Amino acid sequence: METKSGLRLSALQLNAVTGNKQANIEKVNKLISQNLPQDTDILILPEVWTIGWACEEFTKSAETLDENSPVFSLLSSVARKFNVWILGGSFIRKTENGLLYNSCPVFDRKGNLVAVYDKNHLYSYCGCREGSFITPGEKGVIVDIDGIKTGITICYDIRFPEIFREYRKQGAQLLVNMAAWGINKPVPWEILAKARAIENQAYMVALTQCGPINVNSYNIGHSRIIDYLGNTISEIKDQKEGFMTAVIDFDEMEKYRNQCTILEDVKDNYEVIIK
């Protein structure tokens, strides 16, 4: 029998049905139930899988995160059924005071909600109006998943190396970005994901949606798992819905970090002289 020495990461690339939360909940439940790779330890979903990238649908789809929440109910039950940790992509979370957040819930293997990350940076350019509906989060979140410190980000956050560096300084070994990334930005999607892995000597999961957003735009549909040297170790290259998976042993990464101690060379401040 094959033994597993590390953690198996499985990430679901899918095309959300725009504006239909119930259809997406049923789709995700079916894909997981029928196709989740065996012995998965951590299951990761993409950004706004509940509603698709449709800012005008955010308010209508918003829900509070409690036991009456359809998203809570699905993810908690899946975590228990398959004995997996879940980084729940993101959904639109409504607070008691009426604010909306683009939020990633994290569930442990017993289905307990252990953390919520609110997207820190909101994309409001090129026709998108996320910031008109969503309140930005103010803090990063690291979750200890079976001994692996995991730093969470969502989509546009990937353009801000500061949050990833802070995660690394706080001991993060695994970095995750869950996105709904547009098809016309392939170079930033690949290069930024690899840069975040290389500069922080960490494994990086860059998961995005695939397929059409509306009649005029598409998700990029090229998700990757990247090692601490910037190598792609698992990917889905096309618009196909399905899982990418990798078993990761973090021992070699820690050895490399101990040999190549680049963070010790980072200065507290970088003074710039302008002449």
Image: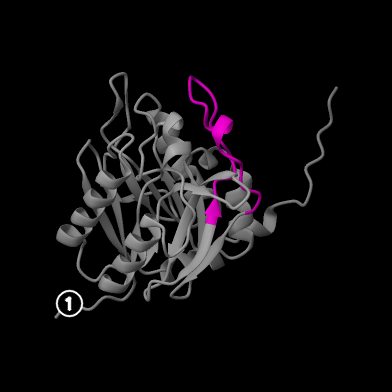
Q: Is residue 64 above or below residue 187?
A: below
Residue at 32 percent of width and 44 percent of height: 21
Residue at 48 percent of width and 20 percent of height: 127
Disc 1 element? loop
Please say whether residue 96 is visible from this viewpoint: yes
Q: Nearer the viewer, residue 182 or 70?
A: 70
Q: Which residues are magenta?
A: 117-139
Q: Nearer the viewer, residue 95 or 5?
A: 95
Q: Nearer the viewer, residue 270 or 120?
A: 120
Left or right: residue 14 versus residue 199 is left
Bin the neighbour count of mark 1 within 10 Å (Cα to Cα): few under 14, some 14-19, many 20 and up.
few
Left or right: residue 246 versus residue 267 is left
Residue 136 inside the magenta-drawn segment:
yes
Q: Nearer the viewer, residue 20 or 172?
A: 20
Q: Quadrant for residue 33, please give it.
A: bottom left
- Name the spot of residue 198 as percent of width and height, x first: 49, 49
- Name the spot of residue 173 as percent of width and height, x first: 50, 63
Residue 211 inside the magenta-drawn segment:
no
Residue at 43 percent of width and 49 percent of height: 90
Q: Quadrant for residue 239, please give it.
A: top left
Q: Quadrant for residue 37, please give it.
A: bottom left
- Name the spot of residue 208 as percent of width and height, x first: 35, 42
Kindly identify the amino acid type of the residue bearing the numbered disc 1: Glu
Left or right: residue 174 versus residue 39 is right
- By secondary structure, the bulk of the magenta-drawn segment is best described as loop
